[in-house]
Image (cartoon, rainbow, N blue to C red):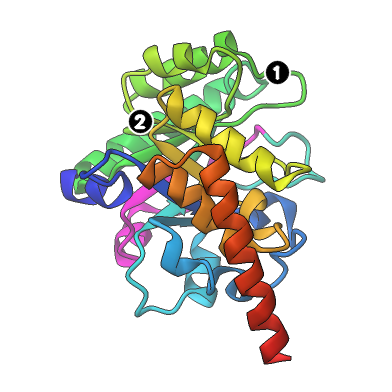
Amino acid sequence: MKNRFSRIIRPDDGRCVMLAVDHGYFLGPTEKLEVPQRTIKPLLPYADSLMLTRGVLRTSVNPSTNVPIVLRVSGATSIVGEDLSKETITTSIEDAIKLNVSCLAISIFVGSKYEHQTLANLATLVDNGEKYGIPVLAVTAVGKEMVRDARYLGLACRVAGELGAHLVKTYYCEHFEKVVEGSPVPVIIAGGKKLEKDVDVLELTFNAIREGAAGVDMGRNIWQSEYPVAMIKAVRSIVHENFSVKEAYDLFVKEKNNERKSTTITR
């Protein structure tokens, strides 16, 4: 368990840059994730870990890749379904072991119609993970009717930790430090929907780290960027090198120009 967890949260600084590419399990072929392999490949060298489903892992990630895998194991509903919170465990622990994953990920919907079901799913997954030494990441999903404030997110993170999750993924909010303080396990932030400006992504990352987050699990704000490699490098600089927003943005601009030159030469 400790060995696998050390592959997700780096022991040297207690932080992580997780790349989320699991969106298709309920959104389908999301913009710029239509062909997962094409999106994932250039970003892999800069991700501490990769969060995805078994289908995309098997079809879109080279088996020789040594990046730790965080396997999404909850789902069974989509954006056209009855209710996104009506999830179940979709992957057996045996299959996760065969896939050699470092962590299991599951969503919980605190305050939703199916709250009990998703929290019971988490408890079951933790039990199964404990049998085989595999840590669990609980994702505090938020429905349209839920307010993303410190009170609600703090509740969801605390419940996840109390039920045995080893790591929690949630959203950044005002007074985020209270969410972190109330969680018995490390908290990482979701990037959420694509932000309008590149610098906004870096400000989000910086503020979250400053207020206690152990890292990020970003997807759309990295691979929907016009310059995804430059963006993940800039995010890494904040998480692992304690860059300021300005320093990270300067790095982003530099790497963006390199990407432009590389594209021009290739063409």
Q: Residue furthest right?
A: 80
Q: Which residues are magenta?
A: 85-105
Which image quadrant: the N terminus?
top left
Q: Amino acid type of disc 2?
A: Ala
In-front residue for pair 229/106:
229
CA distance for labels 1 and 2:
22 Å
Q: Which residue is mark 2?
A: 165
What residue sits 69% from the left and 47% below the top? Answer: 198
Residue 20: within the magenta?
no
Determine whether the residue tagged by mark 2 lies in a helix, strand or loop: loop
Q: Position of residue 52 (x, y in %)?
A: 51, 57
In-front residue for pair 253/33:
253
Q: Residue furthest top?
A: 151
Q: Which residue is mark 1?
A: 146
Residue 98: within the magenta?
yes
Determine whether the residue tagged by mark 1 lies in a helix, strand or loop: loop
Quick one: label 2, few (<14), some, or many (20+) residues within 10 Å? many
What residue sits 29% from the left and 60% below the top? Answer: 97
What residue sits 53% from the left and 52% below the top? Answer: 234
In-front residue for pair 204/97:
204
Residues tagged 1 and 2 counted as in contact (Cβ below 8 A) = no
Q: Position of residue 245 (x, y in %)?
A: 55, 39
Which image quadrant: the C terminus?
bottom right
State left or right for residue 205 relative to residue 259.
Answer: left
For residue 256, above or below residue 4:
below
Q: Amino acid type of disc 1?
A: Met
* Res 17 label: none
Quick one: label 1, few (<14), some, or many (20+) residues within 10 Å? some
